Image (cartoon, rainbow, N blue to C red):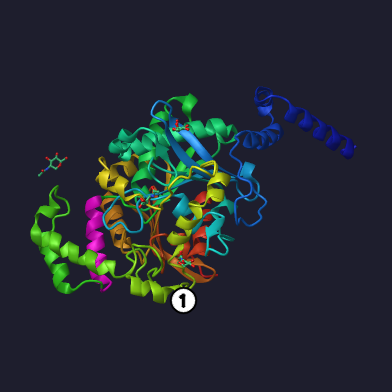
Amino acid sequence: MDFVVKLMFTLILALIASLSMEVVVGARSDWQWSNKYNKLNLLESGDLVINLPGQPKVDFQHHAGYVTVDEKNGRALFYWFYEASTLPDEKPLVLWLNGGDKKLFVPGPGCSSVGYGATQEIGPFIVDTDGHPLKLNPYAWNTEANMLFLESPVGVGFSYSNTTTDYDNLGDDFTANDAYTFLYKWFLKFPSYRSRIFYVAGESYAGKYVPELAELILDKNKDPTLLINLKGILLGNPETCDAEDWKGLVDYAWSHAVVSDETHETIRMSCDFNSNNTWSNNDCSQAVDEVLRQYKEIDIYSLYTSVCIGNSTSSGGSEQDIIASNMPRIMGGYDPCLDEYATTYYNRPDVQKALHVSNGDHLKNWSICNMKIFDDWSDSKESVLPIYKKLIAAGLRIWVYSGDTDGRVPVLSTRYSLSSLGLPITRAWRPWYHKKQVGGWLQEYEGLTFATFRGAGHAVPIFKPSESLAFFSSFLRGESPPFKRY
Ligand SMILES: *[C@@H]1O[C@H](CO)[C@@H](O)[C@H](O)[C@H]1NC(C)=O
Ligand SMILES: *[C@@H]1O[C@H](CO)[C@@H](O)[C@H](O)[C@H]1NC(C)=O
Ligand SMILES: *[C@@H]1O[C@H](CO)[C@@H](O)[C@H](O)[C@H]1NC(C)=O
Ligand SMILES: *[C@@H]1O[C@H](CO)[C@@H](O)[C@H](O)[C@H]1NC(C)=O
């Protein structure tokens, strides 16, 4: 009997598979059909990635390609989507965004979510040395959720515009609007995710992008036909409020022995980070330059690890390069040269072809950060704290975490920002544990959870992959990470 039912089921599935998409849409009300429909649809998107060079074998599907966000100007954003490795139909959808990142010494946008998030931090395939271009990440976040990585805005990574003047208009609002249009159109490509529980996550300058996009989604959700099932946001070492971020940066540099007492005292006396013209005070700008000068000697994003002495023109002198080629670069499990591997990998013709970026002949020039975008950025919100208030009022889950060895958006900046929100504390400061060790400290506020990661740099999951995955899982469940060692 059981066998007959299974056989009938299989036959019906086969029949549905042979029918047009419209018919399948009609069958969607039944969840079993919707599962099948999901699979069919993923194939239909035409973006399924097969034969990605060097890719380890996996059981889940992944998709990459462009979504046009403006037909008239020819603007297209590149995405890479990894289905959850198990039970993708039951798991939420998470959009991940990176912002400005390495090599930028002042706040700003322009770096790739594919180059950082997907292939250095939380994606299933981590870039590795040239001989083995990709290795499997056992702590990939797609073990817990369906993960969507977006290169945003145009000019970042593979994302582009055919209208050069678009690049003159880039800014926070432009980015949020294009990301929203992207989501709208992406859901047309992958309709089975349309009503899925949805989160937006990101780090660094995405500290601005993520709340801005969340606010736009909430506004658009007033029209029920546009509803996106947004439940919360997750932010790592996020740029939040320029004044508090600067104050935290200089205090952290001083308290971590990067600059002298004298330099810090000059900053304390002469810098008004709340003013519009902070840098017109000479004493202030010279003292802050001194902070950045000291930071250029080390990795501002990870104070206690080595810098990459590789082949990149941006690092070291030529003498150093020669020494470096013969030096083991992986120290303490952390390889500071991942940016270079990523750049080599994404500029390969066979890789670009597999990711539906180019036909393999006319290559796109991929770089991990686009400095020009960064320089030309015209609209940056000074603070997204007012948006936090709005999101909290709307009942969204907001979790903010901070790697405590980052000097760029240090834990102090985040604490100053959150403290200025003045939220009531619901559970006082305490350690949280992972595998019987302190992962970091945690404080819960009404409407917001803040956690530190002990010994992690700016891109936390690179340094603490297992802790990060456990923390991500806690976030998705809405349950605090363990407060007890056992
Ligand atoms: C941009 O221009 C190229 C070359 O004409 C074209 O192939 C591509 O489809 C255009 N992109 C968009 C998003 O319209
Ligand atoms: C600072 O900028 C704000 C907003 O742009 C403006 O309203 C204010 O007048 C400016 N203050 C000064 C002192 O320039
Ligand atoms: C640096 O260059 C050498 C020789 O060209 C090459 O073998 C090596 O893989 C390169 N390293 C990186 C990090 O790109
Ligand atoms: C690719 O981009 C890099 C960095 O922006 C630039 O230096 C290089 O000249 C570009 N190459 C080409 C072929 O456009």
Q: Does residue 136 appear left or right of residue 328 in this picture?
A: right
Q: Residues within 10 Å of mark 1 (few under 14, many from 20)?
A: few
Relative height, residue 323 to residue 216 (above, below): below
Horizontal and vertical percent position of residue 212: 35, 40
Q: Position of residue 92 (x, y in %)?
A: 56, 44
24 in magenta: no
Please state the extent of the stretch shown in magenta in the rendering.
242-257
Residue 117's x, y, as percent? 46, 53
State yes or no: residue 250 in magenta.
yes
Q: Secondary structure at mark 1?
A: loop
Q: Is mark 1 within 8 Å of ligand 3?
A: no
Q: Quadrant of the N terminus?
A: top right
Res. 479 visible in picture: no
Q: Is residue 447 visible?
A: yes
Q: Which residue is mark 1?
A: 326
Please report the residue visible at 54 percent of the width from the left and 41 percent of the height from the top: 359
Q: With 420 as the anchor, is 338 left or right in this view?
A: right
The residue closer to the viewer here, 380 or 5, is 380
The secondary structure that most of the magenta stretch takes on is: helix
Amino acid identity at mark 1: Asn
Residue found at x 66% / y 55%: 57
State the residue in front, 362 or 194. 362
